[in-house]
Amino acid sequence: MSAERSAQVTIMNLTLLPDWNSLDSVRSAHSNLEGAALVFFALLVVFDVLAHLAENQKEKARLLEKIGLWCFGIAVLSEIVGYRYGQRNDALSDKEIRSLDVVAHDADSTAKGARTTADGAKTKADAVGLEAGQAETKITEVDRRADDLAYFLSARRVQDESGLESDLRKEFAGQHIAFDSYVGDDEAYWLCWQLSEIARKAGVDSKDECASKQLLRQLPITDLHISAPTIEEGQRLSTVLKRPHRVPGLVVSLNVAPELIVTVGVKPSVPLFPMVKKTEDNRSAKQ
């Protein structure tokens, strides 16, 4: 009965949820849903503020509150559907990693067999050497694919450390830059710490404030946020940090502040259900 139930659930998923069997399409759908949820949560905050400002116009305030509730509903629905795609992404990723492990194991066995044959049959050394070379090439390709997959599934990190260090030394050596991230966000902490250490090696007056930023009653910063004395200086630092194989992510927000501060925000894929409760608490406090 359990197998029959599992088959029914799979058929239902294939019917109701599109792009279900491809890892790339599942990732794309999951990312789009998370992005939609962020947008509608932001709209919820906007309409909530507008409703509060329109307290003296009851009809307008009620309309704005209704629109905000619709935005809240759509955001929660996006999170729910996105959660299903997130589970599917984990399942497909695990399946692909297992497949790569099997291929790597087979290729390694082939290479070992080729080396044994070469040792025991010196008269066929040339042929065996060619076979071993092909096996080594196959192992190298499998390792490369496994490394690429592991990178996309792992936490954010800077791959091009030497390039980032070199550019920071050219552009910002001797300047003060503070690096911070949210309390309790281990994933962001390690990227923040890595950036702070690279900047220190580049001769930057680097200040490590990672895992010290408090998560207040508002939507958290996602990806990367740069504060700088001028927008031009912030854009210059953003260009250095966001070159290929450096700080992952798509979003960099800028604002003007007295000192240079780089805030490593949460990953956009982090579930926002805790933020929903905080938003509701805000609305209750206002009422």
Image (tube, rainbow, N blue to C red):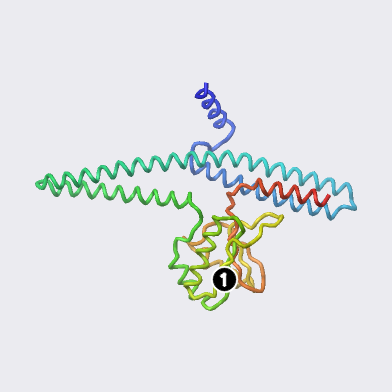
Residue in the image at 55% along x and 42% along y: 86
Crowding at label 1, few (<14), some or many (≥20) Cα neighbours within 10 Å? some
The residue wearing badge 1 is: 207
282 vs 189, left or right, is: right
Q: Nearer the viewer, residue 13 or 274?
A: 274
107 vs 252, left or right, is: left
* Residue 54: percent from left, percent from top: 86, 53
* Residue 228: percent from left, percent from top: 63, 71
* Residue 204: percent from left, percent from top: 52, 74
Residue in the image at 29% along x and 44% along y: 107
Q: Residue extending furthest bottom?
A: 174
Q: Is residue 254 above or below residue 271?
A: below
Q: Secondary structure at mark 1?
A: strand
Q: Is residue 171 above or below residue 74?
A: below
Asked which quadrant contains residue 205, the reply is bottom right
Q: Nearer the viewer, residue 209 or 170?
A: 209
Residue in the image at 63% along x and 68% along y: 227
* Residue 124: percent from left, percent from top: 12, 46
Residue in the image at 53% along x and 78% along y: 174
35 vs 173, left or right, is: right
